[in-house]
Image (cartoon, grey):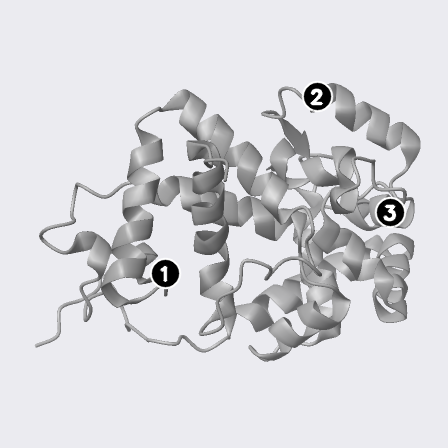
Amino acid sequence: MASSSPRTLLLLVLAVAVVVSDAQSQLSETFYDATCPQAASIVQQKVNAFVDADRGLAAALMRLHFHDCFVRGCDGSVLLNSTDTMLTEKEALLNKGSLRGFEQIDEIKMELECACPDNFTQLVARFARVGLDARDMVILSGGHSIGQVHCGAFFERLYNFQGLNITDPSMDPEFAAILKVQCPQTKPFGFMALDATNGTFDSAYYLDLLTNKGLLESDVALLSDPLGVEYAIRAVQDPMAFLNEFGWAMIKMGAIPALEPYGWRRHCAFVEPKY
């Protein structure tokens, strides 16, 4: 039997680490097979880049895997941050300052979520859990009218859509060609504006979606449902109405109850002491 390379081992380690928070009690290395077949290649690319930049990270990641799985089973608990009422494994006396690789795992997980987002139905369900409806979801997505996104967030759509080494056929070909110049396959480290009028908050984001020039799969997913298409068209046809609706949706989102209310603070970064 051929021996596995260190990078292959790390790929398996990270593949488990990035799914464990979603899989809950059912761990599976095939967790993403149906919904995100390119997951393994994303993890592999990121691990290769990280280890090339820091050779010592290979040992650090394997140590993380051991500390998580050997002590209490592979539950991802070593990745948790401490709170006021709970000291987690990563900050325990014997581990604090000695375990590392957390930032790299977070970055890999973030890229997976960007490359393999929820579909429209799943997105609606997520918003519903906090009291927001489908309309709120589509309107709040208009926040992508301003800002930039890392090339890695849409790398798979450009070069390896669904693991097939092709460009997403739903993307406008001329737009894809522009993206490939800004985000070459060999150096996908740049940033792209989220819509055509970068820096101006308007409804151009929806026009981009309707003309197949959306960047993120989560944005494109909005048009997979007639309701999303309807709201997108309305935003393009009546930009002022969109701005008004966006404002109200932000207010509604701001009213989502806190899971653990901390009350009034003198300084935003510090919780007031309890006497």
- Give the SS element for disc 2: loop
Q: Position of residue 129 (x, y in %)?
A: 58, 79
Q: Position of residue 122 (x, y in %)?
A: 69, 70
Numbered tag placed on residue 76 in the rendering: 1
Evaluate whether residue 22 shows in this view: yes
Q: Indicate left or right for 88 with 2 as reference.
A: left
Q: Amino acid at mark 1?
A: Gly
Q: Earlier in the sequence, mark 2 or mark 1?
A: 1
Is there CB contact under 8 Å for labels 3 and 1? no
Evaluate whether residue 194 shows in this view: no
Q: Which residue carries the number 2 mark?
A: 184
Distance from Cα at disc 3 to Cα at disc 2: 25 Å
Distance from Cα at disc 3 to Cα at disc 1: 41 Å
Q: Residue at left 41%, top 27%?
A: 51
Q: Residue at left 66%, top 47%?
A: 115
Q: Indicate left or right for 18 with 98 as reference.
A: right
Between disc 3 and disc 1, the foreground one is: 1
